[in-house]
Image: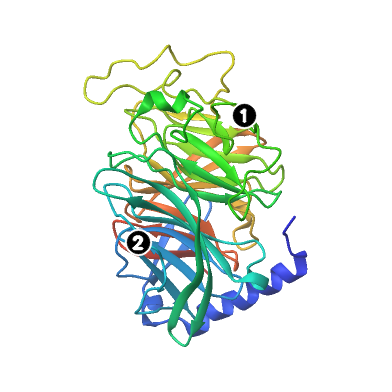
Amino acid sequence: MFFRPKFIKQLHGLVWALIVSICASPVAAQESLLKTERYRLKVETIASGLVSPWSVAFLPDGLTLITEKSGQLRVMQAGRLLPRPVSGLPKVTASGQGGLLDVVAHPAFRQNRLIYWSYTAGTAEAVGTEVARGRLSCSGEDCRLDQVEVIFVQQPKAKTGRHFGSRLIWDRSGHLLVTLGDRGLEDEAQNLGNHLGTVVRITATGAIPADNPFTNRNGVKSEIFTYGNRNVQGAAIHPRTGDLWAHEHGPQGGDELNILKSGRNYGWPVITHGRTYGVGATIGEGTERSDIPKALKIWLPQSIAPSGLTFYTGGLLREWQTSLFLGSLREQRLIRLTLKGNTVIGEERIGGFGRVRDVREGPDGALYVLSDSMGKLFRLTPAK
């Protein structure tokens, strides 16, 4: 396990909060108030002018990384968005829903300076999700990546410009989970001979963990952790159980929230509550099958288009400590789910952020919301 002792985590949070409050740029002075069911919130804009941002990552050294879909990896330093993006990334093919997508730090970032990112690469004929890693260094306002290596390439690539998945999550064994969409080739999500419509699990170097569910099976991709997933763009590890929670896009309705278990089939496109676009016809065999886990929550009749996912565990917003947060691209809202164990018992939709692409708990205990339509990163704290 890669967790620091609690007192170190608390100290890190206090230092990070001090950086945000004292060293922030003039942009951080943009504030508003927002009333929710449990809180009156202060909403600060701490970064703006972003172009289709997709992911945000907080590094242990106080830096914040933000990806822009067109291929720029941006850095916030001492509360200020640096003018120049990180150099040294491999070529990104920004096509349709693809581009530079998720970014995460290695669990031992303090020692190795490694970051990992997902992106789409290829040609005009075929593109696909890849994962690379590199060592981040900064000198003044210039940051770069060295020793860059591609550690995973989705197979096969496809010509379509949709359903790339691409969230990156470290599990408690120190392995990397990568969510991959079906690329619009829906029947392939049931084919274990490729990576389409799956979640894969690899080591920090891109190797295949020995305890993966389909290791050493003929005709099966050994990286696969789960399959039958249409397009997962939000995933998080449960802070208590270590389970992988994820939501995925349905077609016309039928967005799902699931606990993803090793080796399981999550049904797409055989089992779904969604319907075909436009005509509304049913898809597959039905909405349930005995060998396919039931979703924890299904959004009907319309899709919310979910993106980003985080469990809130901080002490700054204590009444939200049983909450799971995700963004809605379609509804243009932040969604808070109240949980009791593994049961969703409540839902609150909070507006004012445009198309929410990512949501994260910061090391200072604040909640951070990334809007791709507004090109902004917001910080949410209780209003005094």
Where the N terminus falls, by quadrant? Answer: bottom right
Name the spot of residue 294 as percent of width and height, x first.
Answer: 56, 23
Q: Is residue 64 above or below residue 298?
A: below
Q: Is residue 343 above or below residue 70?
A: above
The residue beneath circle 2 is 91
Q: Could you tell me how many numbered marks the image carries? A: 2
Q: Is residue 187 above or below residue 329?
A: above
- Kind of residue indicated by mark 1: Gly
Q: Is residue 137 above or below residue 259?
A: below
Query: In the image, 22: left or right of 237?
Result: left
Tell me if I can see residue 187 in this picture: yes
Name the spot of residue 249 as percent of width and height, x first.
Answer: 40, 35
- Kind of residue indicated by mark 2: Lys
Mark 2 or mark 1: name the one nearer the start of the chain: 2
Query: In the image, 300: left or right of 198?
Result: left
The residue beneath circle 1 is 263
Query: In the image, 276: left or right of 259?
Result: left
Residue at horizontal 67%, vertical 72%?
Answer: 111
Name the spot of residue 13 as percent of width and height, x first.
Answer: 64, 71
Q: Depth check: give the residue in front, 221 or 329.
A: 221
- The kind of secondary structure element at disc 1 is loop
- The kind of secondary structure element at disc 2 is loop
